[in-house]
Structures are given as C-alpha cells and as structure tokens.
Amino acid sequence: MADKPSRAVVVYGDGFASLVAQSHTNLHALASLGSCGFLALRAPPSSPSSECQPSRDIRELAQLLDAYDSFDALNKELGEIDSNLQLQKRFMGLRAALFTAGTSIGSFARKVGFSVFEVDELIKKSTSPVEYSMASELLNLLGFSGGKVSEKNDFDLVFLHIKAGQQLKALKDKITINAGVDWLDKFIGELLGISPPGSEIAARLHVSLVLSYGDASENEDQKASISMLPIEESSDLSLLRPCQSYTMKGGKPLNDIRHHHPMLVAQWQEAVTRRDATKEFSHKEFQEARYLAILADRFLHEVAFKLWKAPKYGA
C-alpha cells in the first residue's frame, strides 16, 4: 500500500482488444509490468422494456463506471439527476475528467459527475509527437510535470476514451490522428516513458489500460475461443464449478453475465500493483496467467481504492 494517495490515468480503448499484435511492444510491456485480467460484462436485455435503450458503447462505459443499474435515474436532464449518483458523492469528493471524441459518451459522463473535454484539447502544440503531447497533458492535469510530483493537481483521475479507427482532428484541423492500435501503442509508450519505473511519478501514478472487443455480436463464431470459462459449458464437470464472484453483485447472483468477449485490463503502479506472470497483452496470455476476473461494475471501485477514495472491495 502506498503511503500517499495515488492519481490515476485510465485509457479505455473501445474495440481494440482483437487488434493487438506481437508488434505492439508498448502494450505488451505494460502488461508484463503489472497485473492483468478480465472485466466481465453483462449482456443487454433480449427484450428491452423501453425503446430508448442505450447504445452498446454507453452500456459498456456505464458498467465500467458502475452506473449500469441506474439508467432510469440517469435518463433525465443534467440538473434533475440525484446527486448521490455522481462520482463526487460515491467516491469521497473524487475529481475526475474524461476526454472523448464521442458526443453521447461525453453527455453520459457528465451525468455521472465527470468534467468532460474533447480529445483535441490534449494537443497543445504541433512540434512534439502528438502521442507525447497528449500523455504529457494528461499527467499535467494530475500534477505530474518535469518528472516531479506537485501537491496541487486539478484532478485525481483522468479517463481517456478512444474508439478504434476514430479520426481525431486538432489545432484547427492542422493535425489528424487515425486512432488505430498502432497509435494506441505509441501513446502508451510515451506515457510509460514519462513515468518510467524508479521515477518519482511512477510511485504515485496508477495506470489502467482497458481494451474491449466492441460489438460482440459481430464475432459470434469466436465465443468459445474468447471465453472466461476454464471448463467447457457443455462438459458435465461444469456442474461442479462454484459460482464465480464476477457473476454476483451486492451478494446477489446476476443472470445476465456474458461469459465471452470480456474487457481486457492491465494495471500498473510501481511497488503497489502486484505483478503476475503475464508477458503480453492478449486474451490467451491473460487466460493462462491472470488473477481472477471481476465484474466490470467493480472496476472504478478498484481504481478509487488506489486513490484513497473507496474502501477495498471485499474488505
């Protein structure tokens, strides 16, 4: 446990999980440094009770923010939403910023208490590599600059949302970014380069990289190969398998868990996160070397614990 609260960067890549290749060495480096595993998602209702069901990307983000069970309460104008649903109330005054190029994502994030910004606001100059500029600006917001840690910081958590294949423009269209997995790999490399192991920043910075598969319905034939279950569901041995913690919430079992196409997560903070045997960022590697899967709804609670904004889950 750290002797001071951490500050966190969460990079959420929607639709990137299946695109990672051996050549993406920075993604693999992060996985090898930290603790990796699965975030279990819940399947959408087969017969929606309302025609105004949220889109897939909103549903999955809501699970990461533990707001999935509050859709009805959040389906109001911003000023009418119960303040108890906001991050500041749920996590002891947590100050959080979210950067996105998605209008609907930004609108939802505001409702749960994020300060929302456009991704292009991270790009301050065209001279340095764009990936370095973005990583540096995110860390500046957390009070990390010039290799030093300031006691003054604008936010405790910054959350970068990127959708695979997005075209991002900045500096009045002078810069265009194709947000593919090659770009993401470079960005993670710059982030790790600014906060290398042994540095003052690395001791206070918690990094989470979350990659999803996007629309799982487009990958029906991959259900068996991208599963969280160690035993085939058709096997008689599956009857002996106890109920897993990721299938429960608040002590009650959930009947809508999707046991395939989970989110993949790698977390690292020097001398704080435990290190597992993972060597690369892939489903196969996580399946063989991971610590157990958790429900995606618990993700933000785990990050908030590192920031001293929530009790340890299960404690």
Image: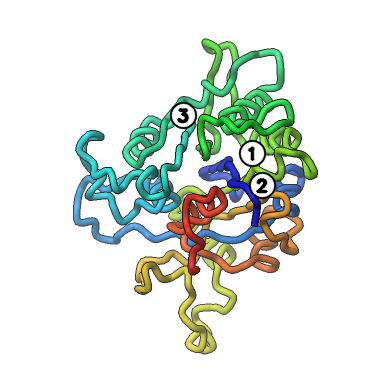
Question: Marks 2 and 1: in contact by CB < 8 Å?
Answer: yes
Residue assigned mark 3: 101
Which residue does the image show at 35% across and 71% down from the upper left?
A: 255
What amino acid is found at the position of numbered circle 1 in the picture?
Answer: Val
Mark 1 or mark 3, which is nearer the start of the sequence? 3
Q: Please identify the quarter of the rendering in which residue 47 is found.
A: bottom left
For the residue pair 151 and 230, the one nearer the viewer reads as 151
Q: Secondary structure at mark 3?
A: loop
Residue 135: image x %, image y %?
64, 30
| The N terminus: image quadrant | bottom right
For the residue pair 219 and 270, the one nearer the viewer reads as 270
Q: How is the image coloured?
A: rainbow
What amino acid is found at the position of numbered circle 3 in the picture?
Answer: Ala
Which residue does the image show at 41% across and 31% down from the upper left?
A: 115
Residue assigned mark 1: 181
Q: Which mark is residue 20?
A: 2
Which residue does the image show at 62% across and 46% down from the upper left?
A: 206
Q: CA distance from mark 2 to mark 3?
A: 22 Å
For the residue pair 257 and 158, the one nearer the viewer reads as 158
